[in-house]
Each structure stands twice: as structure tokens, then as C-alpha cells.
Image: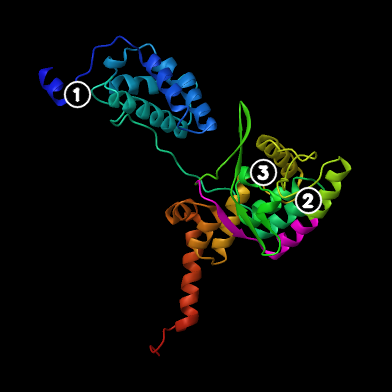
Amino acid sequence: MLSAEDAGDHVEPSRSTVGEWLEEWVAATKAEISPKTHERYAEIVRCYLKPGLGAMKLQKLTTGDIQRAYGEFDRNPSPRTRRHVNRILKSALASAVEQQRLTRNPAASKVGLPKVERKPASTLTVEQSGRLLAAIRHTTTYWPVLIALATGMRRGEILALRWKNVELDNGAVRVVESLEQTKAGLRFKAPKAEKARAVPLPRFALAELKDWKRKQAEALLRLGVRQDGDTLVCPREDGKPKQPDSLTHEFTYLVGRATDVPRVRFHDLRHSHATQLLSAGVHPKIVQERLGHSTIAITLDLYSHVSDTMQANAARTLDGMYGERGAGLD
């Protein structure tokens, strides 16, 4: 005890429980993270951590206690959720160590978490994308789907896109905001990587957006609303922001009715954009910049399933350069 006191590691004895600390920690993180992330933290604590560990004394918690609690989850979460639960507990207990509530973090040790098997993302081919666009052309969902396939933007980024950030003359969109749906309502925030980016538009999408801007202005004017630079490109019919979940529901319904189109999620349109570009030989760095990934490693890791096609294309390119027998080997 004297040695710990001298080293500044002394921890005052406490009878507080794991549940009490978790509640305190969740409240403290509210100012540091986004509302959506805070909701997720609170949900994990409420549904998984407090039922399994909440009644235990914080200073008596062991790695074995954590392992037993993980093995007795009532709701049988997926391997990915289990790892997320552990990340949150590890972070909460690390904070307890920093505040001298604990001498060590019992969640820092390996606790036998299941392996998460990453499945390749569902994607559409160019032909399937075309059939989907043709099938939903008569709906307002057509525009966010078109933008997703043409730019790889995220759902929230598309719903936050304003006309002042669509450069119709230069043929590009500037991604500067994202729309987030929380229990408290809708909020605009910075993009995921907190860095704005410009994404050049293909000509077919540029022509469509020019036509849509005119049609939207006419429709809003009939409702007594004037279109300006701050008007959203993909809003509700009255010009107000559309809830991201509403777009997801609309898309799921429409894609289910489309002929010869696989059942995909809205986010899979982003994956489709990236996969189509990489398969066509576009450099991964360009794809990374279009998607807004913080590093090229993330892009290469997410779309490793395209590497076989890229490797085969590279071999064919070398054949074209050297010939099948190799230059100078005849």
C-alpha cells in the first residue's frame, strides 16, 4: 500500500458496483461522442453489461467474471455484437483506472471472444444497377439511389446534400455534411471522417440532376416553397429533411419489387459503386477518395474480394505488354 501510494497508484476502497460505474461513465461520454454513438453505448450497457455484471463490486471484478458473464448472455448476441460489448466495457474500465477507481483493467486481457467472419458485401453489377434505376424511376427514391451509385456517398451524406454543394457547371458534388437520425430527432453533422471531399459526377448523373433541380423547383413552388442553395437535393416532398430510416424502408420495398435485381441494402449501393470502379481498373486511391475513407488500407481491406479480378487483369495486361511467350524469349 505504501509503495502504491508513493507511485501514485493507490486506489481508495469503494463499495460501488460495476453498474453504478457504467452509468457514470456513459453520462460522462455524452459530451465527447455523437448522439447516435452515445445511444448505442447506453443500449449496450442497459441490455448486456448491467444484467451480467452490474451487481458486482467494481474493485472485485475479474477477467473470469467477465468471461462467465459473456457466456451467459440472455439475448445471444452475434459475434460482432459481443466484440462491440467488450470494446465498450474495456473502454469504461480503462477510464476507471485513469480515475484511480481500479488498479488494473480486467477487460484488457483476452476473454475468449468469438471470431467475426467477414462476409463479402452484396453488390450490384452495372447491368443490375441500370435495371434498378429503370424500375424506380417514377419514384422520389430514384434520386438518392442515382447519387449513391454515381458517387458512393453514404445515406446520411446524400440526405444532407444541398444544391449549393452540387457544382452543376463543374460536374461535382462537395460532401460537407451528413444527416443523422437519433431518438431526439434529426441533426446535421460533419461527414464520418470529419473531412469534406469533392466527388466528380459522371455525365449521366450530372444530366439527371440538372433535370431534377428544375422539376424540384417547380414542385416546391406549388407548395409555396422557394428553392435556393440551402434546399436539400433529396428531401421530403415539402423540402424538409427526410429521415434516413424512411429512405431505407422505401428502398427495401422498391428493390423487392424490381425484376432481376438482387435484394440489397441501401448501403450496398456504396459497395456496388466501389466494386464496379475497382473491377474496371480504377486505382484504389481514387476509390478511397471518392468514398471518403481515412486511409487506403480501409478501402483495400473492405474490397479485398475484388483483388482476384484485379490480379487476373494485371496478368492479362502483362501478356499484352510482353506477349504470351515473353519479350525476347522466342
Query: Mark 2 or 3 closer to N-term?
Result: 2
9 vs 313: above or below:
above
Residue 207: say if magenta: yes
Image location (x, y in percent) of residue 118: 47, 44
Image location (x, y in percent) of residue 210: 77, 58
Question: Looking at numbered disc 1 in the image, what kind of residue is underneath it?
Answer: Asp
For the magenta stretch, what is the residue range? 194-211
Assess disc 2: are there few (<14), some (14-19) or many (≥20) residues with their C-alpha within 10 Å of its C-alpha: some
Image location (x, y in percent) of residue 100: 26, 22
Quadrant in which residue 8 is drawn: top left
Assess disc 3: are there few (<14), some (14-19) or many (≥20) residues with their C-alpha within 10 Å of its C-alpha: many
Q: Which residue is mark 1?
A: 9
Could you tell me if residue 76 is visible in this image?
Answer: no
* Quarter in which the N terminus is drawn: top left
Assess disc 1: are there few (<14), some (14-19) or many (≥20) residues with their C-alpha within 10 Å of its C-alpha: some
Q: Which mark is residue 159?
A: 3
230 vs 81: above or below:
below
**1 vs 2, front mark:** 1
- State the residue at coordinates (30%, 23%): 99
Q: Which mark is residue 33?
A: none
Image location (x, y in percent) of residue 166: 68, 55
Query: Mark 1 or 3 closer to N-term?
Result: 1
Q: Which residue is mark 2?
A: 135
